[in-house]
């Protein structure tokens, strides 16, 4: 393993660098999760290269509702660790109008997206949400 290799926070295997919308991101071969820098995600969302089928578009719109507001004192969960600094990432909705829960490094190193979340976010951004 290369000392610069990042590990999937779910499976602890090395991520593979792939190109998505002309940007380099890192993906887990098992779960399809993506690690993106903040600059990469902004660039991806400005582009319109990826085309989505009707089912993906409809599913993205159907599931765009606010996350459950959980009482964090009562609910125990293990926060994902940042792939750069190892500190706990914060889970929150992508934006006020895009209610997809993402994990973000508080130091700005990047975000973790579960499988298909990048597609759902793109659909909603392109739809003007």
Image (cartoon, grey):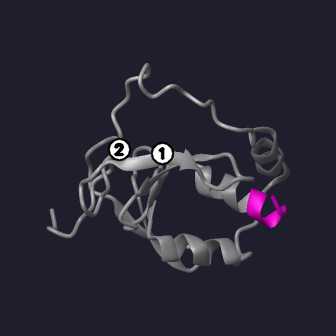
Do the CB atoms of the residues marked 1 and 2 lie less than 8 Å apart?
yes
Picture coordinates of residue 100, whole percent (x, y): 63, 46
The answer to whether residue 129 of the structure is visible from this angle is: yes
Q: Residue at x 14, y 68 (%)?
A: 3
The residue identified by callout 1 is: 91
The relative height of residue 47 versus residue 50 in the rendered view (above or below) is below
Which is more toward the observer, 80 or 20? Answer: 80
In the picture, the disc for residue 80 is 2
Q: Going by the image, does 49 lie left or right of 118?
A: right
Sequence order check, earlier mark of 1 and 2: 2
Task: Classify mark 1: helix, strand or loop.
Answer: strand
Q: Going by the image, does 6 lie left or right of 32?
A: left
Crowding at label 2, few (<14), some or many (≥20) Cα neighbours within 10 Å? some
Q: Quadrant of residue 101?
A: top right
Q: Going by the image, does 27 lie left or right of 51?
A: left
Picture coordinates of residue 52, whole percent (x, y): 77, 59
125 in magenta: yes
Crowding at label 1, few (<14), some or many (≥20) Cα neighbours within 10 Å? some
Picture coordinates of residue 62, whole percent (x, y): 81, 39
Picture coordinates of residue 4, whole percent (x, y): 20, 70
Q: Residue at x 78, y 42 (%)?
A: 59
Q: Quadrant of the N terminus?
A: bottom left
The relative height of residue 128 versus residue 62 in the rendered view (above or below) is below
Q: Residue at x 74, y 75 (%)?
A: 48
The answer to whether residue 115 of the structure is visible from this angle is: no
Closer to the camera: disc 1 or disc 2? Answer: 1
User: What distance separates the C-alpha of mark 1 from that of mark 2?
Assistant: 9 Å
Magenta-highlighted residues: 124-129
Which is more toward the observer, 4 or 71? Answer: 71
Q: Quadrant of the C terminus?
A: bottom right
Task: Classify mark 2: helix, strand or loop.
Answer: loop
């Amino acid at each position: 393993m290369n000392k610069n290799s990042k590990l999937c926070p779910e499976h602890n295997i090395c991520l593979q660098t792939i190109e998505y919308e002309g940007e380099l991101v890192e993906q887990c071969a098992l779960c399809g999760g993506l690690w993106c820098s903040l600059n990469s995600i902004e660039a991806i969302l400005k582009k319109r290269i990826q085309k989505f089928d009707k089912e993906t578009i409809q599913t993205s719109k159907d599931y765009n509702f606010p996350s459950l507001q959980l009482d964090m004192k009562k609910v125990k969960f293990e926060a994902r660790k940042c792939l750069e600094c190892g500190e706990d990432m914060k889970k929150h909705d992508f934006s006020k109008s895009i209610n997809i829960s993402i994990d973000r490094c508080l130091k700005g190193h990047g975000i973790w997206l579960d499988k298909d979340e990048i597609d759902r976010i793109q659909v909603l951004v392109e739809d003007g949400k």
